[in-house]
Amino acid sequence: MASLGRMAMLLVLAGILVSASPAAEEGVLRMKSSDGGYSYNHTLAHILVEYASAVYTSDLTSLFTWTCPRCEGHTKGFEMIEIIVDVENCLQAFVGVAPDPRSIIIAFRGTQQHSVSNWIEDLFWKQLDVIYPGMPDAMVHHGFYSAYYNTTLRHEILKSIQWARKTYGTLPINVVGHSMGGALASFCALDLSVKFGSQEVELMTFGQPRVGNPAFASYFSEQVPRTIRVTHQNDVVPHLPPYYYYLGEWTYHHFAREVWLHETIEGNVVTRNETICDDSGEDPTCSRSVYGISVADHLEYYGVTLHADSRGTCQFVIGAANSAYSYIREVDGTIILSRYLQEPRALESM
């Protein structure tokens, strides 16, 4: 019955999306593009999606030591600095240093596989309900905004970056995330771009939902020009919360630049395409050209699994004392595994 209910919800979703489909539009809201010549890198995408997958690992010891099954392939040699698990809010992120590309990696986990259908149903009805600080016309999704700015995540991530740059040098920063993790990664990348400069931060997300209105999307594109937002075939999540061009600033609106992964079939030949979309954020020839109703397409990108490796909503495992992580702390319901001694420091000074 639960499966039937979810299917019914998806059918309703498809029907409502028809009313907002490109065929019914007179145009798409355009935004200024300031990407500075930044372009999609296929090889980099294949590397970063593995970090977006690894952050779903529930065995924190194997994740910290980078020995988990998802910690192989293109990410060998990664050095973990800190893992943050907010148990109460079911959030997980890590910070570390990668050998290739030589950079600081910040990865955010998305929604658990076994709760994704309920999350999608909830996401469909979310309203723009927070004015982004300093931008009176820019409105964002309260839940995503709060999950980054009003939890322990931000404070710990900023401290880890500070330590990493002091220890490894002034490395560039790559922020990644899938699904809800993509939304959190977006707010993190914006935060870091304002702090360190737009040329220091790159963002790549996979199957992320919309997070703000057109004013926010325009501001975001100016502040974080080195952004790629990957979508896959009929993935339902990039279509949510819904976009209605006729609502102007009161609708959700994606920021650029989208890269749409999709297959075309001619006879017996299947072609895998990677379409680089325009700078509108809502290119009607990319993922918006189809009705996104697939959860399966949401859980796999570039052939890489993007969901939790345990059935529990927020389960995690920490092995016996291990010299790899020097410090384990609990702060306001958040478990923190780190490689360095934590020093109290005011967030405003970072």
Image: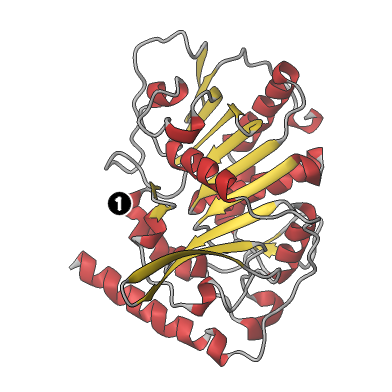
Please provide percent x and percent y for residue 348: 79, 32
According to the picture, the residue beneath numbered tag 1 turns out to be 114
Kind of residue sitting beneath label 1: His
Q: Please identify the quadrant where the C terminus is shown.
A: top right
**Foreground residue among 97 and 46:** 46
Write the residue at 54% across / 90% down.
Answer: 23
| In-image side of 200 versus 284 (left or right) | right
Q: Is residue 332 visible?
A: no
**Foreground residue among 307 and 242:** 307
Write the residue at 65% across / 86% down.
Answer: 246
| In-image side of 265 versus 74 (left or right) | left
Write the residue at 69% across / 55% down.
Answer: 39
User: Does 308 appear above or below 246?
Assistant: above
**Foreground residue among 44 and 173:** 44
Q: How many marks?
A: 1
User: Does 202 appear above or below 237?
Assistant: above
